[in-house]
Image: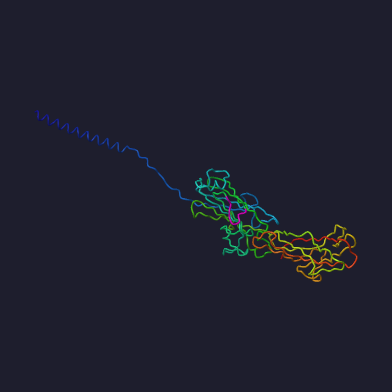
């Protein structure tokens, strides 16, 4: 009896142990199943190349169409005129820390800024319809302007802005561009250029080789991706930022024609005549009209030279010529405007105003009697478009 009881007790202990082990296993499994994980999710945003949605050329820092093919830039003879290339850049990766404001170039293009723009290049260049990389303006290259290698204000204006805050280039005459943030992904730029008086004219110009050409504003914006350089296109047109430059009349004309002291009966010629140099002051070939006008010294309207002591010299006694020649071979001055066909030429490449001059020669025949003193008259010399 005692052995049976011991055996039964052992069995109960064994069963209890198994139950306990089972319970512990179940508890352990439950604990394992109930543990919470916190995995980290990550992804890398790839770069999106910026785009230029519009390019305009305007007389003011305004994001709107101004100059066009039909509404050309007209330079200021003897001076300069400021024009602006304006446009809008969109970068889906962001352009600036805020959704508005007017950051400087240093702020906009700084490393580590919220946007990834790094530089802006803007050119305003004389262009043509050909695809060879040259225009008709002396064979100067389009690529030369875009690469900042061209320093000629006849055909190229260039600006480059980056984190240094500067506008540099072979012909960076415009100063630093300004910026206006429209949203976290959109910024507008306004780049001024100081246009020289001798800029190549491409519209209605007597320099006929340029008539088929035009001017074009081109914009390149770079971001953190080395290949994210884009060329701007004008909004709604296939002709990207294309405009014209009109010719302007402007010559530097001396205010006196001095024959010096001459004896009665003298007729000047190639050895003793006088001359004036008429100088190019703008951007087109120009001629001049000449005519005698009212003499305020005596009120006469027939073009005579009135003398302070005695008499006068008739208008036809003065003659002009395009060469250093004799009195007989010269053309008599009249009270009617006459085109001399002087043809003051365009300047050499970027030589500036006053770099080309054409001489107009003057001869005179002094009466043999009836005049004395200082004789003076008034001649009108007027610029007109050349042929």
Q: Is residue 96 left or right of residue 257?
A: left
Q: Residue 127: give x, y in percent of width and height.
A: 61, 61
- Identify the magenta region: 166-173
Instruction: Check the picture and name the quadrant holding the N terminus.
Output: top left
382 to 175, vertically: above or below: below
Q: Residue 98: give x, y in percent of width and height.
A: 54, 43
Q: Which residue is at the front of the view, 4 or 357?
A: 357
On the image, which quarter does residue 386 sit in? bottom right
Q: Residue 181: give x, y in percent of width and height.
A: 56, 46
Q: Which residue is drawn at the image coordinates 79% and 65% (left, top)?
A: 274
Residue at the top extreme? Answer: 2
Q: Which residue is at the front of the view, 325 or 113?
A: 325
Total of numbered circles in the picture? Answer: 0
On the image, which quarter does residue 276 sit in? bottom right
Q: Which residue is at the front of the view, 113 or 171?
A: 171
301 to 97, vertically: above or below: below
Look at the magenta stretch and give its main secondary structure.
loop
16 to 332, vertically: above or below: above
Q: Residue 234: give x, y in percent of width and height.
A: 58, 55
200 to 12, vertically: above or below: below
Q: Is residue 282 magenta?
A: no
Q: Which color scheme does this rendered protein use?
A: rainbow
Q: Which residue is drawn at the image coordinates 55% and 50% (left, top)?
A: 162
Q: Which residue is at the front of the view, 222 or 325?
A: 325
Q: Is residue 57 left or right of residue 379?
A: left
On the image, which quarter does residue 3 sit in? top left
Instruction: Check the picture and name the quadrant holding the C terminus.
Output: bottom right
Q: Is residue 249 left or right of residue 62?
A: right
Q: Is residue 170 magenta?
A: yes
């Amino acid at each position: 009896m005692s052995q049976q009881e011991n055996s039964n007790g052992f069995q109960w202990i064994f069963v209890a142990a198994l139950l306990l082990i089972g319970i512990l296993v179940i508890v352990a499994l439950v604990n394992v199943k109930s543990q919470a994980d916190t995995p980290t999710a990550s992804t890398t945003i790839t770069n999106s190349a910026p785009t230029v949605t519009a390019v305009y050329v305007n007389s003011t820092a305004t994001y709107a169409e101004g100059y066009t093919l039909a509404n050309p830039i007209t330079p200021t003879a003897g001076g300069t005129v400021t024009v602006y290339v304006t446009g809008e850049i969109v970068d889906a990766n962001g352009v600036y820390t805020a959704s508005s404001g007017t950051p400087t170039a240093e702020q906009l293009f700084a490393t580590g800024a919220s946007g990834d723009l790094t530089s802006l290049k803007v050119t305003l260049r004389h262009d043509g319809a050909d695809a060879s990389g040259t225009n008709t303006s002396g064979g100067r290259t389009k690529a030369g302007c875009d690469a900042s290698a061209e320093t000629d204000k006849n055909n190229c204006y260039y600006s480059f802005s980056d984190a240094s805050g500067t506008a540099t280039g072979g012909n960076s005459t415009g100063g630093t561009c300004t910026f206006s943030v429209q949203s976290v992904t959109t910024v507008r730029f306004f780049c001024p250029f100081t246009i020289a008086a001798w800029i190549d004219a491409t519209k209605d110009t007597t320099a006929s080789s340029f008539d088929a050409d035009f001017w074009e504003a081109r914009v390149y914006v770079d971001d953190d991706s080395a290949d994210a350089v884009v060329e701007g296109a004008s909004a709604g047109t296939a002709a990207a930022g294309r405009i014209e430059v009109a010719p302007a009349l402007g010559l530097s004309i001396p205010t006196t024609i001095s024959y010096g002291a001459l004896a009665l009966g003298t007729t000047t010629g190639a050895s003793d005549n006088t001359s004036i140099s008429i100088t190019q002051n703008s951007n087109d070939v120009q001629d001049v009209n000449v005519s005698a006008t009212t003499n305020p010294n005596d009120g006469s309207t027939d073009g005579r030279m009135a003398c302070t002591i005695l008499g006068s010299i008739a208008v036809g006694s003065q003659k002009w010529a395009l060469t250093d020649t004799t009195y007989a071979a010269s053309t008599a001055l009249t009270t009617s405007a006459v085109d001399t066909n002087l043809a003051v030429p365009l300047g050499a490449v970027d030589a500036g105003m006053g770099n080309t001059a054409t001489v107009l020669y003057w001869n005179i025949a002094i009466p043999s009697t009836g005049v004395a003193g200082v004789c003076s008259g008034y001649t009108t010399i007027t610029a007109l478009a050349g042929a």
